Image (cartoon, rainbow, N blue to C red):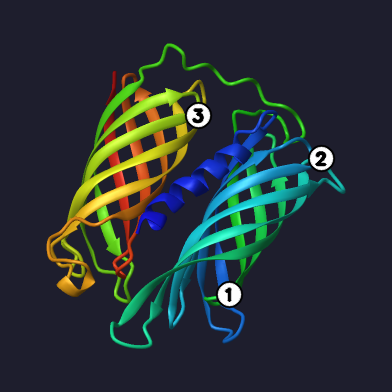
Amino acid sequence: MLARATGCLIFALFLFSVLFAPGAAAQEIHLLGGAVQERASRDRSYSWAVQYLEGLGENWAVSFSWLNEGHFEHHHRDGHTLQIWARTKPLWKRFVLAAGIGPYRYYDTQLAKEGASYVDSHGWGIVTSFSASWHLDNRWIFSLQSNFVETSRSIDSRSLLVGIGYQLDASAPPDEKPAAAAGTENAARNEIAVFGGQTVVNSRDSENALALMLEYRRNLGRHFDWTVGWLYEGDPGPVNRHGMLSQLWLVRRFFDDRLALSVGGGAYIPVDRHRKPGEGGDDDPTLAGIATMAAGYEFRPPWMIRISWNRVVTDYNRDTDVFLAGIGLRF
């Protein structure tokens, strides 16, 4: 359980060493959607992804993505990817071809072979990607991307996605350096926020319920935040869970620090009233991991609006996705 709880944090720290390396420039955010095919059975499903990409000079980039591979008959799989990209502009400066490769941390809801109706399988794979993108004068980007996923304990897949992106804090093409970001020395370092949203169980039926969260956030520097909070996941059926959580965050700020994109990882200590004694105890606290992708915008200082996708990772087949939106007060 400890390995699951700390794995998200280790992955996030490795991400920091790459994404926030000196000389990084030309940050981009992409939303892509399309179709995916399981390579063995040739079953098809939908696929979509949210991708943050940061340039490392003219010909290299690194990206962090959430890839959702839809619902096959025996697999509901999604996960996080970290890729290094080689890029070239063979014809025009605004037309970019790229190839990327990197690890894929997946979460796969599988039809169980014995006993329970499903299991939440976690593992690692490799994702290889190829993309073509066109950069417009007004920062918008149109892109086409193919992904090839290979794993040792889950399915292999291939997908084709199209999407739209936006170049953050840079008015020039990706081969030009953007302006330096503003400092945060005089910014408020504390924040209290309240959230509401929905919990979705990673099961065959995707049961859902109301979710609530109260969070305290402390800024630790230009690229680091720390949070502690209380999460209520509701009672969607398979779980009736609430507890304390704490995460360390990697943060990238844009538009004079009003927009913040972040990824967090840490530990969650919940009490699950539906957990059976054979699964580790009745109403006893347990230890789970949590990984989060989030965005915040300071629309009227000191007020922030925030949205987040939280993945709760357990060792007893009760993983959940918690989608939240909220408002925070900075001080």
Q: Which residue occupies 34% across, 37% down?
A: 306
Tell me whether the residue at label 1 lies in contact with that at label 2, contact meaning CB atoms closer than 8 angstroms.
no
Mark number displayed over residue 93: 2
The numbered mark, 2 or 3, whose residue comes first in the sequence reads 2
Name the spot of residue 171 as percent of width and height, x first: 66, 28
Viewer-proximal residue among 262 and 299: 262
- Mark 1–mark 3 Cα distance, whole angstroms, equals 35 Å
Q: Which residue is mark 1?
A: 152
Q: Residue at x 66, y 34 (%)?
A: 26
Of 64 and 141, which appears nearest the observer? 64
Residue 327 appears in the picture as rendered = yes
**In this view, which residue lies farthest toward the right?**
91
Dot 3 lies on which element?
A: loop
* Cα distance in 3D space between marks 1 and 2: 39 Å
- 30 relative to 271, above or below: above
Q: Earlier in the sequence, mark 1 or mark 3?
A: 1
Which residue is rendered at x = 71% and y = 37% of the image?
56
Q: Quadrant of the C terminus?
A: top left
Decide: few, some or many residues near mark 1? Use Cα within 10 Å; few <14, some 14-19, many ≥20.
few
Instruction: Mark 1 or mark 2: name the one nearer the start of the chain.
Output: 2
Amino acid type at mark 1? Ser
Q: Taking 178 as reference, is 316 left or right?
A: left
> Can residue 232 be seen in the rendering of this structure?
no
Mark 2–mark 3 Cα distance, whole angstroms, equals 31 Å
Q: Is residue 331 above or below residue 136?
A: above
Judged by depth in the image, the label closer to the viewer, 1 or 3, is 1
Q: Which residue is mark 3?
A: 223
Q: Secondary structure at mark 1?
A: loop
- Residue type indicated by callout 2: Lys
x then y, percent, for residue 106: 49, 64
Indicate left or right for 300 with 170 as reference. left
